[in-house]
Amino acid sequence: MAIFPPEKRIWWNEPVEKTEVLWIFIALLWALVMFFMMPYWHVNGNQNLSNEAYRIRPEVYAQRTEEMAAKYTVREEGDTGVPVVRPPAGSDVYMLARLWEWWPVLELEKGQSYRLHLSSVDWLHGFSLQPENINIQVHPGYDMVLTVTPTSSGEFSVVCNEFCGIGHHTMVGKIHVVDK
Amino acid sequence: MAEFRTCPDTGFAIDLAADKLIKWNAVTSVVFLLVGGVFGILVALTRWPAVHLLDPDLFYLALTAHGLDVLLVWIIFFEMALLYFCSAILLKSRLAVPWVGWLQYGLMLVGALITNVAVLQGESSVMFTSYVPMMAAPHFYLGIILFAVGALMGCVVFFATLYIAKRDKTYEGSIPLVTFGAMTAAIIAVFTILAGAVILIPTFLWSLGFIANIDTLMYRVIWWGLGHSSQQINVAAQISCWYAIAAILFNAKPLSEKVSRTAFLFYILFLQLASAHHILVDPGMSSEWKIFNTSYALYLAVLGSMLHGLTVPGAVEAAQRKKGYNRGMFEWLRKAPWGNPVFSGFALSVVLFGFLGGITGVMMGTEQLNIIIHNTMYVPGHFHGTVVVGTTLAFMAMAYWLVPVLWQKELVFPGLAKWQPYLFGLGMGLASIFMMGAGTLGVPRRHWDISFADALMVHQFPESAYLMMGLAGISGVIGGVGGGIFVLNMVGTLLWGKAKVPAPAAAEASEPAPEPAIGGAATEYGSASTLEVPGTFILALVFLTAFVLYYFVNWKYLASVWGLS
């Protein structure tokens, strides 16, 4: 009984029953399959996070985002006054998180790749692209660079899913994806 | 000189100092379960879109309090009771240094109260995780630090008791498996609390203004060395309870001491790596680091859990077959005492923890798969499958045995107790499933309003997401009522429970006192009496099939989202 000391003093020499041995073998095999799925996906999968990230001062990040917006703004989003920025395919695209907005709105082309930068100028935020359901942690002081390739077009929302204070539930941004 | 009493039900010699500490820790834990549970019901009623009960500031406050009081305070107070039970009582020893035990109790209680006050004052709605640079009041951190130091004191008492029991030869051979599991929990607790000290002490100083800046990534990596590892304490403690209940109800002997202890050893060796589960979509950590750490090396801790998943029900099957329940594959299971809350709580805990908590945890802890669930409702869905229907239910089952035995009182509402594990287990199990469903549809966690009524820009979640959140709210309330019935029964038993008739025959009728005869191991290797566990093996294969299918379904889902590199 498990609440008493083992009956056999030398319990570690007891043979293991064959059902258990078989299960250990199966479980170990499954563990290895799951482990090697991750490197396999790095080689053969299309959804991997890059390891590219830089330390950056929030004001520098904000300045780069504003420079991009100044260059490529095409219109304003509805009546919100937020610029819609359409940077060229393949370029560095910045999205800035702050209390409580994602800035600016981006317009991307379907099938093209962009170097998307994500960083915060104040607290932690959560980049949650809906309805794709791509979720990235956004830190202040770290510039994370992802190469994204939109494979569907339409209007996408960026919801904040890291609690960032009392206005957290109002923090929504937009990414538009247009066909060429 | 330590004094002992003899337990009329079990014949154990119980050190009176240990007895008292176990009782105080257990009672306090149940009180905090009540407090945290009430906050939990408020959270459920707010995230249920049709009800949307609380205002945003109160919602975030209630969510912070809910996390702290149930995830931390309820569970760790109960674990302190378990540590004293598994050392002093199971080893029939006196408790070493009882005054340190009282220091444990005092520090944890004061710490829990201080942090609760900080949260209720409204300036510390920073969530359980208290990520910097969002700052709470200094006493929020101070309370947690005191609480953690108290828990460390409890571990000290536990290890010291193991030492004097060995020295005084209060038992023969090796410590029991259940004590070994508790020791696993205590060792992990020491690592965990040290990680907590490394990050929370500087954060406390930062909140006082002595430190200018705490790096957000460093905070998350080290804080989760506390936050995730403390869940591994729970797993080890809960599996000890499983083995203990199997032994108490069925006289079940572990299929193999060697395998079960090795599985616990895997926890000690590898569970410390689990901080990475939370950092999979963060900048600044390499893929190699993420893959190695998130998989606990080569999923060796998962292997440990899969072994326990076979050996715990396997031990029950072997014991039941020995009693003659040998017909077919599952007579042993059908003839189990399903009306006894100790058994039903245990059985539901094993099954729900495996299917809801275990499978989903491994899936979401996969480096790339984390992209499609990180910080969505899937995450609370998963951990309600682990700490609620796994740990909490196992502790409730344990309490249904422990409380009547320690206090020598009859349960005050035996009829309610019969139903309570089903109500709580199914309610919280469904809440867990619906939260995961909502998370798969993208609903964020820790979010007051997914309709974005006050927002400049709006995202329209699909109707199905609202349905999932509504069902999660209803199930959560049902589960919450189930939890309330447990608290009522425990508190009621202490206040109004009738004294037990100490004769073992009378005790047997009302509660599952272990049969005094321990002799006759359930399995004997290499002899004609060797029993196999075919029923358990089939159940294990069902589990594995679900695991494999679910795992690959999520890869397929991942493959459909935008390309990322």
Image: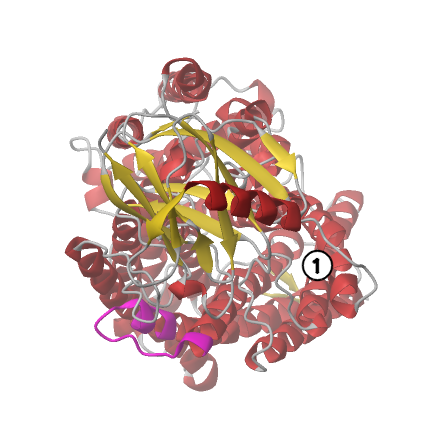
Query: Quick one: B22 or B349, which is closer to the camera?
Result: B349
Q: Which residues are magenta?
A: B42-57
- Residue B122 in the image, given as x and y percentages of width and height: 56, 79
**Relative to B328, is A42 above or below?**
above
* Quadrant of image for the C terminus of chain A: top left
Total marks shown come to: 1
Is any part of residue B451 visible from this angle?
yes
| B55 inside magenta stretch | yes
Q: Is residue B411 visible?
A: no
Query: Colour scheme in the image?
Result: secondary structure
Residue at 47 percent of width and 80 percent of height: B494
Please, what is the three-letter code of the amino acid marked with disc 1? Gly
Q: Residue at position x 66%, y 41% from top? A: A56
Q: Is residue B329 above or below residue A124?
A: above
Q: Position of residue A90 (x, y in %)?
A: 42, 25
Above or below for A26 versus B83: above
Q: Is residue B280 magenta?
A: no
Chain letter for mark 1, please: B
- Count neighbours of disc 1 (C-alpha within 10 A) and say few if under 14, some if 14 to 19, many if 20 or more: many
Which quadrant of the view contains residue B103? bottom right
